[in-house]
Image: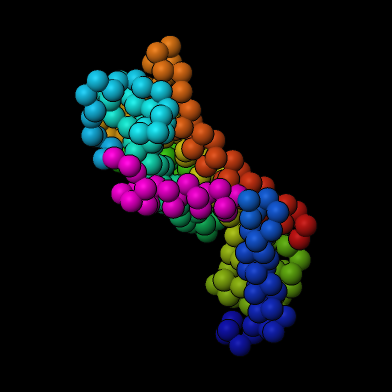
């Protein structure tokens, strides 16, 4: 079907839906979430300018100091400034949020879309999803760490693999559901080809649940990074990350009870912001 079949109401509806998604993030919980995530992201990006010291700079005789004017969050076991290391550690979570999770979402969504085209392809893709889901995330992390070693790319790979089946099955379910909607059947009856229906009706109406899941998956990604680094499967010293800083803080909790407060507060703020964004988008979706 030629694109001349596109009607003004269709174009208006698509534009309205797009504006509605942005509107959900400009007020209430959505705005609060954007502000929280934005503050953390800006702090990480501006770490070279905001950090009072280099993340690896050591101060003689200043191990495990509490908060003070010189070190606002104290120092670690070898005399490094915790605030500086926390600001630089945020960058690892930014990689997780803005690279690994979207990569898993895109790959999974494309596979889910491909699964709706042919029954045999669907079977192969679903069994691949089952294989990935058969391994708990921590087991997958251990296996990949043994193969390629710990590091940011290991964390990113674990998150990508963990999110592929989630977005793949969500996309598959959404596409199959929308294809059975009355307005799609009406367009098909009028002679619209499947490509036009996919572009104009199916994909735009699948974006809503995928957007909500993306925000939720980003918060899960932060926990995965923290858990892997906490267990020694992610970022290794001396490179700072929020998870490794929390781990070190718990190990030194007796001598420096405030050690983990800063990194933990950043994780809480980041996850809370992402959850608020997800809730705002989900609420907007329910009101449609």
Rendered location of residue 218, percent (x, y): 50, 44
Q: Nearer the viewer, residue 232 or 249?
A: 249
Residue at figure coordinates x 46%, y 23% from the top left: 258
| Residue 202 seen | no
Res 231 → quadrant = top left
| Type of secondary structure dominating the magenta stretch | helix
Res 77 → quadrant = top left
Rendered location of residue 273, percent (x, y): 58, 45
Residue at figure coordinates x 34%, y 44% from the top left: 51
Looking at the image, the residue that sits furthest to the front is 69
Residue at figure coordinates x 41%, y 23% from the top left: 66
Q: Quadrant of the N terminus?
A: bottom right
161 w.r.t. 184: above or below = above
Q: Nearer the viewer, residue 21 or 175?
A: 21
Q: Nearer the viewer, residue 121 or 220?
A: 220
| Residue 32 seen | yes
Res 84 → quadrant = top left
Q: Quadrant of the C terminus?
A: bottom right
Part of the protein shown in magenta: 33-53
């Amino acid at each position: 079907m030629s694109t001349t079949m596109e009607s003004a109401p269709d174009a208006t509806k698509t534009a309205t839906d797009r504006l509605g998604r942005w509107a959900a993030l400009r007020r209430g919980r959505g705005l609060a979430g954007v502000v929280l995530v934005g503050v953390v992201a800006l702090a990480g990006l501006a770490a070279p300018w905001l950090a009072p010291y280099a993340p690896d700079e050591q101060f003689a005789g200043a191990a495990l100091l509490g908060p003070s004017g010189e070190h606002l969050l104290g120092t670690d076991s070898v005399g490094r400034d915790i605030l500086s290391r926390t600001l630089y550690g945020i960058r690892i979570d930014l990689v997780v949020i803005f690279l690994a999770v979207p990569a898993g979402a895109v790959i999974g969504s494309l596979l889910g879309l491909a699964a709706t085209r042919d029954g045999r392809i669907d079977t192969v893709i679903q069994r691949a999803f089952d294989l990935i889901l058969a391994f708990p995330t921590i087991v997958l992390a251990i296996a990949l760490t043994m193969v390629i070693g710990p590091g940011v790319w290991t964390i990113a790979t674990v998150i990508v693999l963990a999110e592929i089946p989630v977005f793949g099955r969500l996309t598959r379910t959404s596409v199959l559901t929308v294809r059975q909607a009355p307005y799609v059947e009406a367009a098909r009856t009028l002679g619209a080809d499947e490509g036009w229906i996919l572009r104009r009706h199916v994909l735009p109406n699948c974006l809503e649940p995928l957007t909500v899941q993306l925000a939720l998956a980003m918060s899960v990604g932060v926990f995965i990074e923290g858990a892997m680094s906490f267990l020694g499967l992610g970022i290794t010293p001396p490179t700072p990350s929020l998870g490794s800083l929390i781990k070190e803080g718990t190990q030194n909790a007796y001598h420096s009870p405030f050690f983990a407060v800063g990194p933990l507060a950043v994780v809480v703020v980041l996850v809370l912001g992402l959850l608020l964004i997800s809730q705002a988008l989900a609420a907007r979706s329910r009101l449609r």
